[in-house]
């Protein structure tokens, strides 16, 4: 097997781990939420848990399609006390921006690949939309506006 192929699989494993880690971050943020927006904001974080897990599964399927077994390596400790919606949203924005940057960085390595290039481009589109939704919500200052956008997507 060529080293380039192994490197691509290693990178896919890293992306999968980042998505799984994001899932856990959203899970934990959901239970840290406090304040008057908590109930509405919980739905956003529940959706985040589901979507990041779906992204991790999609990457795992890409790894399997390349003839490999996905390897999940995560070192993560989450803590913290109660958090307001705006602060939780800032953390979510950081998570989504990191994912977007990781996919963009990886794209150059798979340009021309018959399946992976299209897959990574779709992930970039999805993550770009997530970042934009969060930024717009931060500007609007209301979790209800974010939920309205998510329900229309």
Image (cartoon, rainbow, N blue to C red):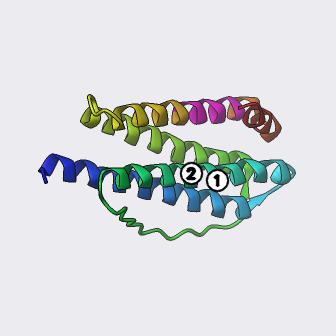
* C-alpha separation, residue under disc 1 versus residue under disc 2: 6 Å
Picture coordinates of residue 78 (x, y %)? 55, 68
Badge 2 marks a residue whose secondary structure is helix
Q: Which residue is mark 2?
A: 54
Find residue 41 and report its horizontal and vertical position in percent: 77, 49
Residue at 42% of width from left, 36% of height from top? 119
What's the magenta bit mostly, secondary-structure-wise?
helix
Residue occupying image coordinates x 30% and y 59% = 68
- In the rendered structure, the answer to whether residue 68 lies left or right of residue 61 reads left
Q: Is residue 88 above or below residue 29?
A: above
Image location (x, y in percent) of residue 133: 65, 32
The residues colored magenta run: 128-137
Residue 77 counted in the magenta span: no
Do residues under tags 1 and 2 come within 8 Å of each other at their CB atoms? yes
Q: Nearer the viewer, residue 139 or 20?
A: 20
Q: Which of 13/41 is in front?
A: 13
Secondary structure at numbered mark 1: helix
Q: Which residue is mark 1?
A: 50
The residue lying at 58 percent from left, 31 percent from top is: 129
Name, please, the residue furthest toward the right. Answer: 36
Label of residue 151 in the image: none
Q: How many marks?
A: 2
Find the residue positioned furthest to the left.
2
Mark 1, Cα crowd under 10 Å, few <14 / some 14-19 / many 20+, is: few
């Amino acid at each position: 097997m060529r080293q380039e192929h192994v490197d691509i699989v290693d990178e896919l494993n890293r992306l999968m781990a980042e998505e799984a880690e994001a899932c856990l971050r959203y899970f934990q943020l959901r239970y840290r939420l406090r304040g008057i927006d908590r109930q509405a904001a919980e739905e956003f974080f529940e959706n985040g848990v589901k979507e990041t897990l779906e992204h991790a599964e999609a990457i795992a399927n890409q790894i399997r399609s390349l003839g490999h077994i996905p390897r999940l390596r995560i070192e993560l400790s989450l803590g913290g006390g109660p958090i307001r919606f705006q602060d939780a949203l800032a953390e979510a924005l950081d998570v989504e921006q990191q994912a977007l940057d990781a996919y963009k960085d990886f794209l150059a390595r798979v340009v021309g690949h018959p399946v992976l290039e299209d897959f990574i481009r779709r992930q970039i589109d999805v993550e770009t939309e997530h970042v934009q939704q969060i930024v717009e919500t931060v500007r609007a200052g209301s979790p209800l506006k974010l939920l309205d956008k998510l329900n229309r997507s």
